[in-house]
Amino acid sequence: MTDKRSLRKIMHEKRNSLSSHEVAKASGKIVERLVNLPYVKESRIIMSFMPYGNEVNIIPLNEWILEQGKALCIPRVLDGTNMDAVKIDSIMTGLVKNSYGIYEPSKDLKPIEPEKIELILVPGVAFDINGNRLGHGKGYYDRFLLNRSKNAITLGIAYSFQVLDSIPHDEHDVRLDGIVTESEVILLNRR
Ligand SMILES: Nc1ncnc2c1ncn2[C@@H]1O[C@H](COP(=O)(O)OP(=O)(O)O)[C@@H](O)[C@H]1O
Ligand SMILES: [Mg+2]
């Protein structure tokens, strides 16, 4: 099995080679699946993310969450290892670019208590059919997810090419409850 670093490189190259049309088309299907998912419809406090580069464009879902009157939380990097999440009222205001070039809530906003979040949408570089996730290599989500509510649902958001049969994972890697891609919704009945 390839190691995490090599897999990150391979998957980054694949994602970087997507055209803007391919990103838009797949992202549209993923958002369509998400708004029809009971977990998404029923959750009132949702943590999503702001896409970086060719990541799935989930911004239309973020707008939908706000339109529905649900609470939208977006991650914010605190230092080289930790992040928190902040409830934002608008995608247009209150977000600034961080050191990684990702839009995040500005420093002056107060974080939400992680255990209040009902649904957490998790970006990633690769996933496997057992819910394992490979991130960018800093472990931000692994640490953040330790503080989630035991009732919270975690869903990976990915292109179908990012979901493999098996990926390298370690003891500290937090497994997700499901993965949503343009071609399928994978739910791992772990609860
Ligand atoms: N809960 C944790 N507590 C302490 N260190 C952690 C924790 N989760 C991850 N790490 C550390 O963070 C680093 C990156 O983790 P890794 O799983 O490779 O990254 P990613 O999940 O972003 O792909 C590793 O050195 C790992 O030991
Ligand atoms: Mg990890």
Image (cartoon, rainbow, N blue to C red):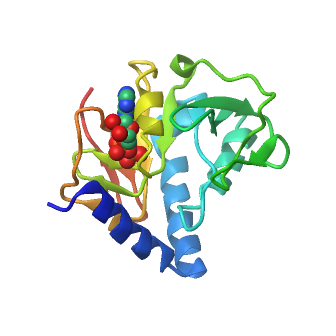
Say left or right for 73 vs 10.
Answer: right
Where is ligand 1, by quadrant?
top left
The spot of residue 98 in percent (x, y) is 70, 47
The spot of residue 60 in percent (x, y) is 67, 56
The spot of residue 36 in percent (x, y) is 50, 48
Instruction: Give residue 14's quadrant in the image.
Output: bottom left
Of residues 79 and 110, the one drawn nearer to the viewer in this rendering: 79
What is the quadrant of the C terminus in the image? Answer: top left
Residue displayed at 63% across by 32% down: 78
Of all residues, the one furthest to the front in this rendering is 80
Say left or right for 176 vs 102.
Answer: left
Of all residues, the one furthest to the right in this rendering is 93
Total numbered labels: 0
Of residues 11 and 151, the one drawn nearer to the viewer in this rendering: 11
Of all residues, the one furthest to the left in this rendering is 1
What is the quadrant of the N terminus in the image? Answer: bottom left
Say left or right for 33 vs 108.
Answer: left
Vertical relation: 2 (above or below) 98:
below
Residue displayed at 74% across by 42% down: 67
Instruction: Give residue 2's quadrant in the image.
Output: bottom left
Vertical relation: 7 (above or below) 130:
below
The spot of residue 168 in percent (x, y) is 21, 51
Residue displayed at 59% across by 65% down: 53
**Is residue 70 shown to the viewer in this render?**
no
**Is residue 137 shown to the viewer in this render?**
yes
Of residues 3 and 61, the one drawn nearer to the viewer in this rendering: 3
